[in-house]
Image (cartoon, rainbow, N blue to C red):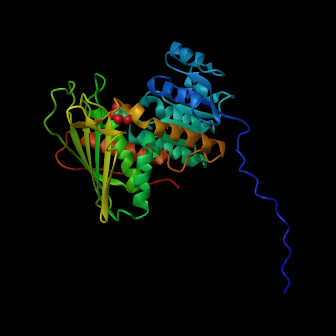
Amino acid sequence: MSETPTTPTAPAAPEQSALPQDVRVGIIGVGRMGADHVERIRGRIKGARVSVISDYVRETAEKVAAATPGSRVVDTPEEVIAAEDVDAILIASPGAFHRDQTLAAIAAGKPVLCEKPLAMNPQDAYDVVRAEAASGATYVSLGFMRRFDAEYAELKDALDAGELGTPLLLNCKHRNATVLPGFDDTMMVYDSAVHEIDAISYFLEEPVVSVQTVVPRSTELAPEGLHDPLLFVFRTESGVVVTDELWVSTNAGYEVRTELVGSKGAATIGQAGGRVTTQLEGGRWGGDVPLDFRPRFIAAYDAEVQAWINAVADGSNVAPRSATAWDGYVGAAVCEATELSLTADGEVTVGLESRPS
Ligand code: ISE
């Protein structure tokens, strides 16, 4: 039998970007984090530029725009979302506005990278999950930058490759030098522990079923209203136990350590954020600890935003390692149970809605 002649094919064309030009990013909120993102997009991110900026304090937006060629200021987040010269939206406003702004971006059919948290409670976060599912597309990336940290990725890849066997324990330590006045136990959950709560989804890919808070003696440096340190103990569906030690007034520096204990071995990341020097005068050894999360995770933030821009440009909108609206909902549900566990005796159960298809 003769073979059907095949038409010679041209070499595959390079992948086309869904957009003919740089992705034009609209930024909502240019406080500390938003201004950081503007600087990163202006200086280090390829294939993107900041086109429109808004901030609750207009002068702040104007100051940032003045240093960002090609950008303009508008009065409201709604104007950023609707702007014709905005292809994608980065939300860095206070958390209480994230639900409504993310829903507006979905309604406008524009991809959005929303800083954590997705919403202040699970019901609001679930509204975003449902709206995105109803739209039939994916629009929402959530700013859990640790997923783009090189050490995080290395640990995740080792776990997925089976190098560590079956996960048994995940031990996390999260330390800040200081926190702003007013930082209390609830913020310890929603602002800080939320990162490890997302790390559970990222590393273990299974739900948390219960959480318990253990309260040790507090440091005399703890601000009023804060128990510091706090220890949270999570249990996942398959029985992995996750310990999360939060200590946010160390007066020393920023440290994030993660140890995964598996049936075939244990691996730790975040031990030394750079060079450790021996032979210091007086026979000591040591290195530097960054003062806050920005220097520690600058490469992770860059990688996160670059991956998001690439995903927007190729039309997939959400990068493969990124946290999604569903991750944001799961995080909010676990945070709510964790907050309850601050004052409860014993374990508090976590309940989750079903995931819309
Ligand atoms: C802050 O908001 C962050 O997101 C940091 O990553 C975290 O380490 C810190 O505890 C939070 O206050």
| Closest to the observer, 323 or 258 | 258
* Left or right: 204, with 26 as reference point: left
| Residue projecting furthest to the left | 217
* Left or right: 333, with 29 as reference point: left
Give the number of marks.
0
Vertical comparison of 64 with 257: above or below: above
Asked whether residue 144 appears in the rendered view, the answer is: no
Identify the residue at horizontal 26%, vertical 32% (top origin).
248
Vertical comparison of 146 with 58: above or below: below
| Residue projecting furthest to the bottom | 1
x then y, percent, for residue 62: 56, 15
x then y, percent, for residue 125: 44, 41
Identify the residue at horizontal 76%, vertical 53% (top origin).
13
Q: In which quarter of the image is residue 83?
A: top right
x then y, percent, for residue 171: 27, 50
Vertical comparison of 127 with 158: above or below: above
Identify the residue at horizontal 86%, vertical 68% (top origin).
7
Q: In which quarter of the image is residue 342?
A: top left
Identify the residue at horizontal 44%, vertical 50% (top origin).
153
x then y, percent, for residue 267: 32, 55
| Quadrant of the snapshot with the N terminus | bottom right
Asked whether residue 65 appears in the rendered view, the answer is: yes
| Closest to the observer, 201 or 118 | 201
Figure quarter occupied by ligand 1: top left
| Closest to the observer, 270 or 215 | 270
| Residue projecting furthest to the top | 59
